[in-house]
Image (spheres, rainbow, N blue to C red):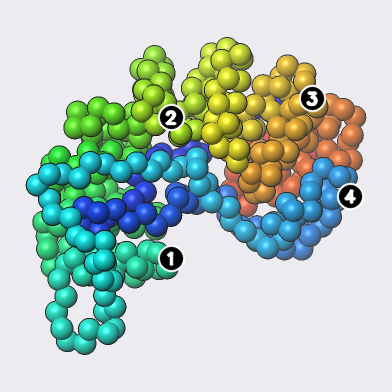
């Protein structure tokens, strides 16, 4: 039985919260992976004990899973690039004070001061409090592009795509020349599967900034979904040119070439993505998939190991490794990995792949 690539693809968002038109980077973490933490610690202990005994899983991975960590899809879903500061806007000094609402008493705060409070909440990981602050700032100054833009980022960080899209839309209404806000609006609409509007806003972003790599990348995702493969290839290549440190465009080019049966180009794309981000689990898995098809079983197993090391909760990695071990006649070790992959797929609600593994284990 052949392995198959199944994974959610996150869009790219410009992850820079803004304090007026000066930039305050707070995190390169991007979206959290779609894989939930495992709910049954006893099953974790049992399966990881089996995997450790077989020698396939390292103690480091076992420790990570036993702590129920939810890894972050950091570099594969994040593209940081400072957009130009509009000449008509004022720039607050870097020494601008962050104000604590609790310490101000009845003294009214300006929108900029409330935004600063929201930024501090973001830095502390308090997303709900940040959203409340940014929303208050939009009420104090409905034309504050900074408030609307930061609110969009925070809403997206919370996972509320509709609210994020609404906030980014208000940001571009406040500043029709803010290319990155258009790109983020397009990304939110893409995640919401509104491909037509997503394409329109991404193209608007590129009209304003023809070198905005994240807009080309997300446009490439749109074209892939609409079946315009040549346009997708062109968009990903442009994204690579303008954002050479982003691994996602190379990865998706590899996926296109894999679907076209061009293994050499696909391998080149995946290897380029891994060179830019050694912890790109999906790229390692996809490389392992090709090597498995080419019957390079030792190399494919190494690739699946790397995928699991990058994301211990990535079920595809264990599934692929289980297939390799089955081929090599190591049925007991293979079953351990397949059962663990099954548990992860079950936690995701992916019943199709649970059934697929059931057929392998109990033919």
Residue at x 58%, y 20% (from the top left corner) = 268
- Element type at mark 4: helix
**Residue 291, x across and y down, in percent:** 71, 22
Q: Quadrant of residue 83?
A: top left
Labels 3 and 2 touching (C-beta < 8 A): no
* Circle on res. 53: 4
Earlier sequence position, callout 4 versus callout 1? 4
Earlier sequence position, callout 1 versus callout 2? 1
Earlier sequence position, callout 3 versus callout 2? 2
Task: Determine which residue is flagged by label 2.
Answer: 244
* Mark count: 4
Earlier sequence position, callout 4 versus callout 3? 4
Labels 4 and 1 touching (C-beta < 8 A): no
> Eyeballing the image, is 337 above or below 126?
above
Residue at x 23%, y 32% (from the top left corner) = 209
* Circle on res. 297: 3
Distance between the alpha carbons at the discs numbered 3 and 1: 43 Å
Residue at x 74%, y 47% (from the top left corner) = 340
Distance between the alpha carbons at the discs numbered 4 and 2: 42 Å
Q: Residues within 10 Å of mark 1 (few under 14, many from 20)?
A: few
- Element type at mark 2: loop
Foreground: disc 3 or disc 2: 2
Q: Residues within 10 Å of mark 2 (few under 14, many from 20)?
A: some
* Circle on res. 125: 1
């Amino acid at each position: 039985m052949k392995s198959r690539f199944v994974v959610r693809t996150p869009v790219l968002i410009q992850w820079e919260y803004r304090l007026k038109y000066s930039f305050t980077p707070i995190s390169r973490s991007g979206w959290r992976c779609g894989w939930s933490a495992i709910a049954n610690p006893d099953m974790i202990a049992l399966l990881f004990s089996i995997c450790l005994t077989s020698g396939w899983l390292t103690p480091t991975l076992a420790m990570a899973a036993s702590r129920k960590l939810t890894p972050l899809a950091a570099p594969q879903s994040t593209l940081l690039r400072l957009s130009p500061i509009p000449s008509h806007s004022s720039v607050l000094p870097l020494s601008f004070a962050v104000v604590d609402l609790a310490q101000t008493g009845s003294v009214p705060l300006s929108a900029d001061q409330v935004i600063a409070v929201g930024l501090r909440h973001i830095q502390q990981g308090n997303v709900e409090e940040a959203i409340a602050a940014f929303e208050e700032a939009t009420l104090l100054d409905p034309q504050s592009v900074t408030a609307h833009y930061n609110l969009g980022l925070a809403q997206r960080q919370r996972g509320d795509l509709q609210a994020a899209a609404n906030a980014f839309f208000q940001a571009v209404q406040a500043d029709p020349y803010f290319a990155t806000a258009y790109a983020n609006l397009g990304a939110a609409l893409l995640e919401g599967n509104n491909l037509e509007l997503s394409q329109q806003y991404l193209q608007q972003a590129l009209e304003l900034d023809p070198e905005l790599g994240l807009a080309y990348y997300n446009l490439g995702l749109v074209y892939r979904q609409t079946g315009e493969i040549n346009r997708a290839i062109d968009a990903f290549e442009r994204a690579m040119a303008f954002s050479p440190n982003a691994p996602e465009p190379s990865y998706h080019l590899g996926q296109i070439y894999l679907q076209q049966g061009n293994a050499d180009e696909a391998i080149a794309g995946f290897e380029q993505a891994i060179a830019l981000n050694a912890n790109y689990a999906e790229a390692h898995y996809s490389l392992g998939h090709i090597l498995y098809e080419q019957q390079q079983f030792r190399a494919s197993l190494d690739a699946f190991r790397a995928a699991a090391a990058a994301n211990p909760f990535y079920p595809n990695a264990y599934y692929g490794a289980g297939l390799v071990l089955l081929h090599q006649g190591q049925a007991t070790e293979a079953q351990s990995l397949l059962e663990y992959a099954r548990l992860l797929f079950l936690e995701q609600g992916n019943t199709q792949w649970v059934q697929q593994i059931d057929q392998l284990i109990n033919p």
